[in-house]
Amino acid sequence: MIAKRVSLLHLKDYRIGRIDLTEEDFKDRTRFNRKFQNIVQFAELGQGSLDIKTIVEAGLKSGARYFLIERTTHMPGTHLIV
């Protein structure tokens, strides 16, 4: 049991795009990396592919008292809400 062992949880979200891979892509790392580039993009918390609600609930069950939300400031169309 990990309850009460985590006091701070670092949160960041990202989007994962679709990628079509072949058997050959798995055999050639350069070929795989070329296809993989730009598939993952950082996103505002809750706007990406991660299940943030489940992650936060697990953090609370683990005793997290603080949640550090990392923002990627160079994303177009993002605004800080205080």
Image (cartoon, helix red, strand yellow):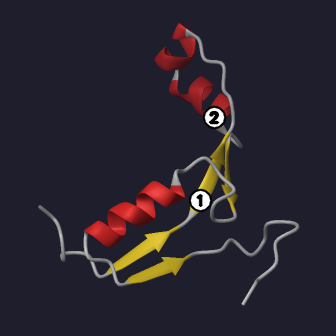
- Is residue 70 placed above or below 16 in the rendered structure? below
Give the camera-side residue of 6 and 23: 6
**Type of the residue with mark 1:** Asp
Assess disc 1: are there few (<14), some (14-19) or many (≥20) residues with their C-alpha within 10 Å of its C-alpha: many
Instruction: Quote the CA–CA distance across marks 1 and 2.
Output: 18 Å
Assess disc 2: are there few (<14), some (14-19) or many (≥20) residues with their C-alpha within 10 Å of its C-alpha: some
**What's the residue at 35%, 84% (across, down)?**
65
Which quadrant holds residue 5? bottom left
Mark 2, secondary structure of its residue: helix
- Image spot of residue 49 (x, y percent): 61, 47
**In which quadrant will I find the N terminus?**
bottom left
**In which quadrant will I find the C terminus?**
bottom right
In the displayed structure image, the side of residue 27 where residue 34 appears, left or right: right
- Image spot of residue 34 (x, y percent): 66, 32
Q: Residue furthest left?
A: 1
- Is residue 74 placed above or below 68 in the rendered structure? above
Query: Which label sits on residue 36?
Result: 2
Give the camera-side residue of 51 and 17: 51
In the displayed structure image, the side of residue 70 where residue 5 appears, left or right: left
Identify the residue under disc 1: 13
